[in-house]
Image (cartoon, coloured by chain):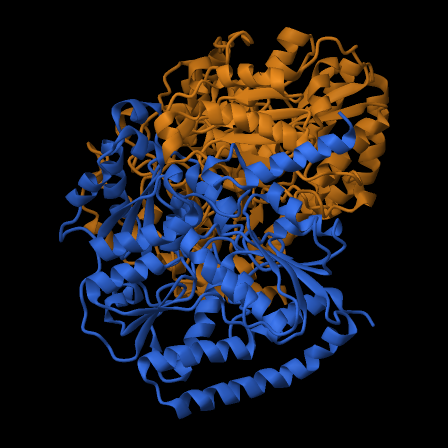
Chain colours: A blue, B orange
Amino acid sequence: MSATEAAKLNQLEDERIAALDPKERPLQETPRHTCALGGVMATASAVRGVVPILHSGGGCGWANFFGFIGASGGGQIGDGGAMTTPCTTLLEKHVVFGGEERLRDQIESTFQLMKGDLFVTVSGCIPALIGDDVEGIVSEFKKPEYPPIISVKSSGFNGTSYDGYEMFFDAVIDQHLEPRPVRRGLVNILGIQPCQHIFWKGDLQEIKYNLDGIGLETNRIFGGTSEIEGLENIPAAELNIVINSWQGLATAKKLEEKFGTPYIVFPGTPIGPKETAGFLRRVAERLHVKEEVVDRWIETRSKLAHDDFNLVATFLYMGFCNVHFAVVADSNIAIGLVRYFTNECGLLPATVIVTDNPPEEAREIIRDRLTNELEGLIVPDVHFENDTYLIHRILEKYSFMLLFASSMEKYASRKYMAGHHTVTFPAFDRIILRRTYAGFGGGNVLLEDLFSKFARPF
Amino acid sequence: MHDVLSELPITDESPIDLTKSTCPTREQRLSVAINAYYGKVSDLVKGTREKTLVQPDRCFEQSGNCLLALNAQRLISIRDSVLLFHSPIGCAAGQHSSHELFQHIPVEQGRPADLDFFHAVSTNLTESDVVFGGYDKLVAALKEADRRYSPRAIFVVTSCASGIIGDDLEGAVNEAQPHVRAKIVPCRTEGFRSRVTQTGYDAFWHGVLKYLVRKDVPKQKDLVNVTNMFSYTWMDKIEISRLLGKLGLRVNFVPEFAKVEDLENLGAAAVTAPICPTFADYLMRGLDEHFGVPYFKEPIPFGVKNTDEWLRTIATYTGKEKEVEELIKEEHANWIPKVDKIRQGLEDIRKGLVEQGLKKENERLTAIGAVGQGRVIGHAAFLEELGLKVAAACTIDYDSLIADSFDSLVKEVGDFVILVSTFQAADYANLFSRLKPDLSLQAPFKGGVIKSAKTIATIHWLRGDHHPSMTQAGYAGAVGYGNMILRCFQNNALTKLLASFDDEPYKEWWYEADPMHFVKGKDDIFKADRVKIGDPDHDEDHGHDHDHGDTADHHHVHVHATGHSHGGGHHDHGDEHGHSHGHDHGHSDGHAHSHGAHVHRLHPCEDSDPARREACIKGREAKQ
């Protein structure tokens, strides 16, 4: 077989595998998420006062600390997070005889030792495979003399970290939340997941700042100092706002079912004045906020953002005049970036590879947001792929000067001769505290980060 | 007592059987392999010789580690190989950095310019796979990994899920092997297999010995295998290559920094030299038994004295006895003055504390190291070289492989406390809080410990770090690491600030509790009173201590004091006897102190105790 023929065969095989559902593929290379257990662990730890208790093998916490929590631009989240997380550390004897007694001991001792307002058992693969009655054990502890405790079935083979976010909320809604009187103007933000969305803390804070700015009150669930009050206040909201085309939607539907809270969906992180204004108008309209209040807020914030933009825009002409860019990111940040760069910066989107494996029904919305209502003549090719090997097979087909992706693409970007900037999980080459590209000035921050790397000296 | 006991041999060394599909666990292979202990090292060794140590169960555990996770951290960096997790996706998540490892190291510092990315792939077991079995998927994955990356070897590591559903690993490997060019190396690393995570390394080495190491490579007298560099750095690689290079020797680093070919050539070396003797034990034994490559277990090249001995030992296997003495002489001339300067710097700090009335005249600075069992040998001896006293060591696990080395160590540096505990953050918090060492050597992934330590140094540089001050091994490492220890004493503002945050995850009572409180049957297993062992305020047991002319081993360390007086029944956990958990801890609220304030504060002038405040102010005035 000639080299050309071999390459052709290889390409056909790549295409065959790319067409398979990730679950059906023989293997996956670093697909930019972890398992459900990791997702629940990180989500739970991001609420101050919530302590996850892993019912799993001893290494589940470690793998997710290094590869999930540590890979999202930071280290440990919360005092009870990461390596302090209680864990039953199941052994062969538990596999054979069951891990229920071990879990009972662990819950009891955790209550004695650890501070916490709400404890969450997070079960991994082993209890699911051996059939431990985790719910039964946990129900033994749902008594007034104990702190509140809930259980989540989150075996690693049963879902991804994206699913873990909703599994956590499912458990909280079903097992912990009580109805509260609806507070006018109170809103919850759903769809931005701690760690999986690397800018989660800053994004949530910036969105709250803007919603509060137009006279609403945003309930802070993650990353605050309000202990679990924010979590318990979820049913008091007048509206749930899902900032994601698919993630958090099931949670919003469940909240509507159980507490009658309506919801709206806004797919993609709003970056820059245009998108942020659109987002705020959409919410304001739904909640009957006075138009002049919204207008005034948008006007003052946009003015400030444009003032900074004037300074940073210089480099858009000098270094990156209408260049092509590629995005490899989760749908939320991908939509935000493409709309900002295309609609406000005049850049040309070559291709977008969406990495969060959204369900079929969400793909149309994502495709729409990535290709419609865009300035300019160029519409990006949209791909859905999360396998690192196959991602590069796609990228090789395009030419671009900037690559917005995870840090996994940092060194590979040399091959494409493109400037690289980390905007999505995993993010090993940057530290992210409350950094955010969301909101009126978020785009400026993004350009600031980008041009600090590439636009100087001159 | 020791001398009689040390004649009791540890006779549990069984041969390495490569006809088996995997290694035995450390628990099966050795007379002692445990991950829960608190007591004196001397008692630990005694218990090992008498075969009286038992592995207890814990009621409370925290996220620790497993055979798979730890092992994967090492295997990922083998060049031209693929690491295949036969697992759900989460087990592989730890390798999200695979395309970045070592990439940032300048080519000028030895990174091969063509260093390719490391590939971590997973069979991504899902619900239907665990129902219908993952065998076919594994066979397909092996073929696909071979097609995609054309590696020289594929390391397959197994998970809890694949183990429980009973996938036939050997069968899948045998079925796939004829169809792939890469050599497939199966490693049985189900997390639940063993409490001793080092079993995972054994499983990997078993695969390497069985499938990779070649018998047909001619012996190379100048080749030295150096094992397990993970928690050492790129700079250590450079330092060790430099030293052995000066002897005219070449180094075969495995598994970190290695190519598959280097693993194949392990059998050609003149000797296998460990960085950590117990991590590489299985390999070293296997190479000796099956490929005729001798090995030694200690010392390890940490600190000046141990580096001397490490080099001398290698020299005896490579016929470099004469050259090594010249090398050592030459190196000493360069490095010893620098180490002396560090020792003097630490001595000045100690004297400063004495002048301030914070330490007694002959009282040494104390340190606790949280390290692997193998590294205790190196660390303890090196701290001693620097003039520090080892108050305690925390190891991830303990087995009889290291017992003789611990025995010698006790004779060399004196007895100290040992806590065996696999990444148990609460155990460390308790230990640091009760023993109040002047210096804590810690790993960053032991959450919460920072809250109860005073002066903190790291034990792990990241493996990609490439500044000379981040060297740990060899002579450059003695200076690099020694300087870091000195720097820690030069400014502890960070530790103080972090400690002042009121956000400890544990309740108050824990910080003075029995460290084995949550161990089942602890009073039958541990006869001694754990709260008193090692506690500078309480330890009255001088029996095991060796004479160092240091009369202040069991000092009252005023530098830690804060106006909270120990005693007064604080350690009277009378309720702890008889049953190990389930009792009420309401009594803990009665402790009249705030932990956050009493353990960490270093600045005694702020002390609420007038006498101490005055002593401090006087000391400061005298200094001026």
The relative height of residue B531 versus residue B259 in the rendered view (above or below) is below
Residue B238: x, y in percent? 77, 36
Residue B466: x, y in percent? 72, 46
Q: Out of B581 and B186, give the one closest to the viewer.
A: B186
Q: Residue at x 39, y 54 (%)?
A: A43
Q: Residue at x 74, y 65 (%)?
A: A454
Q: Residue at x 47, y 78 (%)?
A: A278
Residue B342: x, y in percent? 70, 46
The relative height of residue A348 versus residue B411 in the rendered view (above or below) is below
Q: Quadrant of the C terminus of chain B?
A: bottom right
Q: Is residue B430 left or right of residue A232?
A: right
Q: Residue at x 38, y 49 (%)?
A: A163
Q: Is residue B565 left or right of residue B329?
A: left
Q: Out of B418 and B190, give the one closest to the viewer.
A: B190
Residue B302 visible somewhere in the drawing: no
The relative height of residue B200 versus residue A144 in the rendered view (above or below) is above
